[in-house]
Image (cartoon, grey):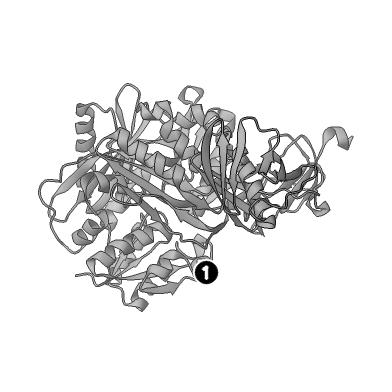
Amino acid sequence: MIQSLLVANRGEIACRVFRTCRELGISTVAVHSDADASALHVREADAAVRLPGAAPADTYLRGDLIVKAALAAGADAVHPGYGFLSENAEFARAVLDAGLVWIGPPPSAIEAMASKTRAKELMGLAPLAEVTEADLPVLVKAAAGGGGRGMRIVRSLSALAGELEAARSEAASAFGDGEVFLEPYIERGRHVEVQVLADAHGTVWALGTRDCSLQRRHQKVIEESPAPGLAPSLVETLHESAVSAARAVGYRGAGTVEFLVSPDGRAHFLEMNTRLQVEHPVTEAVFGLDLVALQLRVAEGAALPEAAPRASGHAVEARLYAEDPSKGWTPQTGVLHALEVPGAAPGLRVDTGYGAGDSIGVHYDPMIAKVIAWAPTRHEAVRRLAHALRRARVHGPVTNRELLVRSLEHPEFTGAQLDTGFYERNLDALTVPGDGERYAAVAAALADAASRGGRFGGWRNVASQPQLKVYGEHEVRYRAGRDGYVVEDVAGLRVVDVTPDRVRLELDGVVRNFGITAHGDQVYVDSPLGTCTLTARPRFADPQDRALPGSLLAPMPGTVVRVGDGLGEGVRVTQGQPLVWLEAMKMEHRIVSPASGILTALHAVPGRQVEVGALLAVVQEEDSAS
């Protein structure tokens, strides 16, 4: 029997495994990098062991250090979570060789399936050896790992070499393995997967289907179970293929077999993930299971019942990321001041690795939380999740929350018209700023005035110039008088009541409440129209904030991983040419030249850590350089 378990991971998945361990009476051990010394998963564990350093390669990817940590803490089992070393056969073997229980499949099964190239060979498939114009588009994929890292769509032969190199670099950084391969890219396919669970006694369960088609940059955003609209015969084929794949490698524990379903209804094997998936809660909700508890029992040698439980209802999961849509979806860092989802009761679940006051750093994935809703029908589950996300209080770095809500309410999604091109078609429309931000700026300005001058601010009996407050692109002009505030230039708006933390506005005859919370120079406005994060613009610009024309500034804190070949001061560059590659939150981001011209300065050096706004390079445009 397992008495003490170490989770060789961090954040949300570590917290999730610890939750089950507490219910089963198993003590817990966390490992942590220096950046995670005060993280939630560390605070929730019974014991914790430091992994010196911050970068994954120095910490969570060091299997030798993690095995030593387990032995030092007296753990008798190791759960790998997902990502990092979860599909590393050598790590699994090292855990077993140390006399510890491995919560996962046998190393031989990991070796057979963890590499996507070898998995395809096992299934009688083969990646593309050479690519011609007729093969396009193709997909570059990392042979190890997942999460969209090391993955690129290539639509022209001229871009192939560059995308291969970028994918190798990203895969090596994220998984410690730079192997990549090529396969055909199916336009408008559906990403469908089957959860399997196997014991050591010959029983293999196929626990329904999941649809994970809503992906941006190959990162899953919204997942659901069961996958809607599949023909019963196709579901049966998917289940049979998944069980056959598990049996072929002597699988044990929880795993996922992934398929791409073409528009004509044919299933194409993608890979088998020999671990728990991020989206496993939707399967748990539909089947009424705790997959982590079952993983532990299987690892202890228990047998599964011969038949899997029956599914009931529908579940949908949304991944809340710290990323800014107005800045090219770059990952965001900073303090998470509040994370509150209303109605977290039966039918709604929140999995997170952060608590109020925690910092979201640059070294790891930018996912803040997963919000999961269950209901008897798909329509009800989708509605419940959208409502919960819209009313949630998420104060801190900018997030993709508005994208999630709008995606869940989009006619294609509500109508179950799902495919991996959803965001390619709809992203621009889904990210158009709404009127809610304008009203939020009004509420923030009035609350600020009230905080400085009482309930109605400092009113006067004589006419005065309007007060001005600017948040981003929104200028708010208002006057304070005996009867309260009057806002200029906003038709159909009447100010009902103002306090420093709550404003009531009548908009075209409908009164709405706006809650206002300030943290430093950030103002968070929560209302039925959504939540807005605003930053007050100073009346006078700071001269130090001015940058030379053509300056390339770091859009996020990160590490310079490489600089374009042959670049240096005086070199001519072209518009759109990649100059610098930054790694932040386990992904690479290319910084390109804003114009054609001369590189007059290059401050980026591989290996150097940079803060947001750091000057990386300066390009003088050709017209001004001549």
Q: Where, by quadrant of the figure, is residue 468 drawn? A: top right
Residue 4 is situated, as x and y percent measured from the top left of the image, at 28, 72
Residue type at the position of mark 1: Asp
Nearer the observer, 65 or 334: 334
Q: Residue at 53% x, 53% y: name it.
A: 395
Q: Which residue is mark 1?
A: 34
Left-right relation of 269 to 188: left
Residue 526 is situated, as x and y percent measured from the top left of the image, at 52, 46
Nearer the observer, 381 or 281: 381
Quarter of the image for the C terminus: give it: top right
Q: Residue at 40% x, 57% y: name it.
A: 12
Left-right relation of 50 to 99: right
Label 1: few (<14), some (14–19) or many (≥20) C-alpha neighbours in 10 Å? some
The furthest residue to the left? 306
Q: Where, by quadrant of the figure, is residue 105 drawn? A: bottom left
Residue 375 is situated, as x and y percent measured from the top left of the image, at 27, 40
Q: Is residue 64 above or below residue 139?
A: below
Residue 118 is situated, as x and y percent measured from the top left of the image, at 34, 44
